Image (tube, helix red, strand yellow):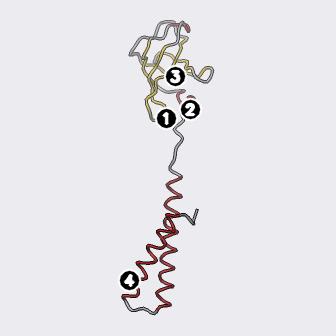
Amino acid sequence: QFFTIKNLVAFFTIFGWTGIACLDSEMSMMAVIITSLVAGLIMMSVMAAIFYFFSKLTDSGTMNIQNAVGGVGEIYLTVRAKRGNIGKVSLMVQGSLRELEAITDDEEDLKNGMVINVKEVINGNLLLISKS
């Protein structure tokens, strides 16, 4: 994407200002044109590189729930013992705090505020947790 409107504007801006500066310093017309063309092309290349690297800074933001495995979190809604019900936990996944559904195989209920560990992901969207 070398020939875009932004890059052409940058080219003609630097081409023009370089030409004015070279004419003011009383260079020959051929030297002015060559210097201006080179400066314009360099600026065009710099702009293309900047926008190329900016485009590489994007991130989809999609959470991969498998990244929660091994994580430590806190019970938000009570999780009943022996997979008695689906509760909710709060934990950090991929750098952001998430509230996810969870069940447990533990012998006792996991109440609000308890610290838990994530053991595995079941059916792609449900966490199997245990008390820390």
Determine the residue positioned at 51% across, 47% down: 58
Q: Nearer the viewer, residue 41 or 93?
A: 41
Q: Amino acid at mark 3?
A: Val
For the residues bearing labels 2 and 1, Cβ distance under 8 angstroms: yes
Between the C-alphas of marks 1 and 4, the distance is: 52 Å
Q: Nearer the viewer, residue 33 or 90?
A: 33
Q: Which residue matches tag 2?
A: 64
Sequence-wise, which precedes: disc 1 or disc 4? 4
Tell me the crowding category of disc 3: few under 14, some 14 to 19, or many 20 or more residues within 10 angstroms, Cα based: many
Q: Which residue is mark 4?
A: 21
Q: CA distance from mark 2 to mark 1?
A: 8 Å
Number of other residues with Cα within 10 Å of mark 4, as a class: few under 14, some 14 to 19, many 20 or more: few
Q: Amino acid at mark 4?
A: Ala
- Dot 2 or dot 4: first in sequence order is 4
Quadrant location, the C terminus = top left
Q: Secondary structure at mark 1?
A: loop
The first of marks 2 and 1 along the sequence is: 2
Helix, strand or loop at label 3? It is strand
Q: Residues within 10 Å of mark 2 (few under 14, many from 20)?
A: few
Residue visible at 42% across and 91% down? 27
Q: CA distance from mark 4 to mark 3?
A: 66 Å
**In the figure, 89 relative to 79: above or below?**
below
Q: Which residue is mark 3?
A: 118
